Amino acid sequence: MKGRAGCRTPVGPGGVSPQPGTMDKPITPGELLCLGSSLAFSGLFYYLYRRKARVVTRIQEAPKLQVDDNLPILVSAAAGRCLPYVALEGIVLPAKAALTSHYHEGLQGVIQKLLLKEHRLVWNSLARSWSESERVLSEQIYTVPFLLASPAPEAVTQVSVDSPLQAVCLPLEMVYERFQQPTHGFRDLLGQYLIGEKPKGILETEEMLRVGAGLTGIGELSLQPDGSLHLQPPAQGGEFFLCLGDWQTVVSELESASGLWKGAALLCAAAGLAVLLHVLCRAYRRSRAKQQQDKEPDGEEAGD
């Protein structure tokens, strides 16, 4: 009578024996990390997508108005003499004195941004190549009180725009741009290669919200006791927008951003699902292999 067969080492797919201890682990730490991070990022991106989508829906549902002489009557009939969220179109006019461009005589605006930015190349020892970096040397923003007026010359109604710097982005146009490249001698070039930094130049720009530009403001519109109209950041929550063009421009940009967040959420969710399916398939294969191993000794004993 033959003795009972000794213990056999389980062989994984491809004939490779698994590492000791791996058979007892349904999921490895690396897989757990990938699964958790993919689900966390998917949830974060989905939250950002839903947030952008809610802003788009609110803008689409907001009343679309233009500055005209009927506007004070419309706002006074609202509860609290206030419209919580509207999209208002008008022409930019300064309330008092306007700002003058530093580089274009006669060009006036109500918001001005002056920027000095240094561009340089930095040697990356790991990639063995030069990479470009930027550093803001100076950034100055000036603003003066301004109004939204009707394009019709006979209309006298004007709306004051309050706290424009609290808008999501400033509606500025580039009116001046110059890139100054430095001159280097042989000694400068040698020092740059030794240090690992090469200055490319300095970018000097000027941006302005010009007088007479068409502007759309999305926010709260209220009628003050003195009869003046004010467009301001929403007091009941919501984002304050100022943009060149109409309200559909803002909606298009927000829809594009929400689409990116949605795609990122789906991609991370798909990655997490792939890791989960891989773990389940491996667990199923191991279960089948274990069942086959348990049947082999029984078959040998029955043959004896």
Image (cartoon, helix red, strand yellow):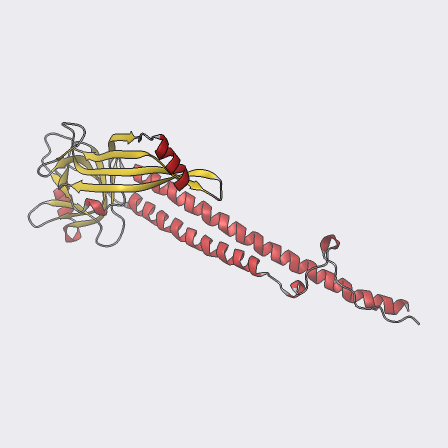
In this picture, is 212 found above or below 139?
A: above
Q: Is residue 34 above or below residue 56?
A: below
Residue furthest to the top? 105
Q: Residue at x 37, y 37 (%)?
A: 191
Residue 122 shown left or right of residue 151 in the figure: right
| Residue at image coords 86%, 71% | 4
Residue closer to the observer: 39 or 123: 123
Residue visible at 20% across and 32% down in the picture: 213
Can residue 149 be seen here? The reply is no
x, y percentage for residue 101? 17, 32
> Which residue is farthest right?
1
Query: Dividing the picture into quarters, in which one does residue 194 lie?
Result: top left
Residue 90 rendering spot, x and y as whole percentages: 18, 36
Looking at this view, name the residue that lies furthest to the front: 187
Nearest the camera: 191 or 130?
191
**In the foreground, 162 or 133:** 133
Where is residue 31? Give x, y as percent. 57, 57
185 left or right of 262 in image: left
Left or right: residue 154 versus residue 172 is left
Give the quarter of the figure containing the C terminus: bottom right
Q: Quadrant of the N terminus?
A: bottom right
Pinpoint residue 285: horizontal percent, then vertical percent. Answer: 69, 58
